[in-house]
Amino acid sequence: MSSAGGSRTELRVVAARRSIVAHIREIWTFRELLGGLIRKELKVRYKNSVLGFLWSMAQPVFLLAVYSFVFSILGAGFENFAIWLLCGLIVWTLVSTTLITSVTSITLNANLVGKVPFPRAVLPLSTFGSAMVHFFLQFGTFAVILMATRHHIEWSYVWLLPIALLALSLLLAASALVLSVVNVRARDTQHLLELALTAMFWINPIVYEYQLIVRWLVAHSWPTWLPLINPVTAIITTFQRVIYGAAAVDDRQLLPDVGAWWYLRNLLIVAGVSVVLLLGALRYFDREEGNLAEVL
């Protein structure tokens, strides 16, 4: 648009602001669309595939076989090391799948964003929903493995798993909303995310025990709570404590043996922080939503 002096000013579309509650209500109103997008995500991923959803169950088993083989050669494992690995891998697969698919959820659906009126937040949330479906399929496979091997889990800690999954869900929903919008503004985000996920995998106690980090921190006079700054660590250690069923094996300390309340405290902190992050993510998404079509 030209001004009297011949200069040009940029037009910016400004959408009506909604409260967070109104935004959530709008998403709930479009829950059928959200469900349809989740089904679409699931169908597209395995379109023309012979095994279909079996691939989602095969992925953690394949990773389990690879890591178990490598660590058996290195002699770095311990009793029931395969179960320990799968406890972390099943959580990590949910995290990585959600982040990788959500970051491009808006850019890959640019035709919908520019033409059809609906709350755009359902796009990244649908990728999280799809990843959650795969998680439950993989967890079912894991349960079969546990029964087949007659592995003993810590039944007195099982009640922590739903809390851990809820806390992780809140965190991933917030991350999905933010990443999807940031990637619209800066397309390098999806490439940087791939690098970040590689680093994130190794800073989580998946292929090694949590207490190994603690011992290193103590040896270097660092605070032992530092690993818990990473919220995924609290989730993974909870799954390990519940499903692996022991805090120590063969006189080797794997996890803090301080009772269920230590794990509950960590989960509640993650859940509380995640709620704040989710509310902030909804506010940020609402602010940017009106300009997504213009940027795309």
Image: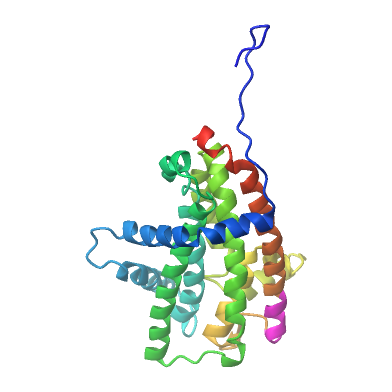
Residue 171 x %, y %: 61, 62
Q: Quadrant of the N terminus?
A: top right
Q: Which residues are magenta?
A: 257-265
Q: Is residue 200 visible?
A: no
Q: In which image quadrant can residue 71 be found? A: bottom left
Count of numbered badges drawn on the protein: 0
Q: Is residue 287 left or right of residue 184?
A: right
Q: Is residue 146 left or right of residue 4?
A: left
Q: In which image quadrant can residue 216 be found? A: bottom right
**Main secondary structure type of the part rendered in magenta:** helix
Q: Is residue 281 above or below residue 9?
A: below
Residue 107 x %, y %: 46, 42
Q: Residue reaching furthest top?
A: 5
Q: Is residue 221 left or right of residue 136?
A: right
Residue 159 x %, y %: 60, 85
Residue 186 within the magenta-colored segment of the rendering: no
Residue 273 x %, y %: 71, 63
Q: Please name the colour scheme applied to the rendered image.
A: rainbow
Q: Is residue 221 left or right of residue 42?
A: right
The residue at the point 51 percent across, 72 percent down is 88
Q: In which image quadrant can residue 62 be found? A: bottom left
Q: Is residue 213 above or below residue 140?
A: above
The residue at the point 55 percent across, 61 percent down is 28
The residue at the point 39 percent across, 68 percent down is 63
Q: Is residue 278 above or below residue 5?
A: below
Q: Is residue 37 visible?
A: yes
Front-lying residue, 88 or 97: 97
Residue 258 within the magenta-colored segment of the rendering: yes
Front-lying residue, 59 or 97: 97
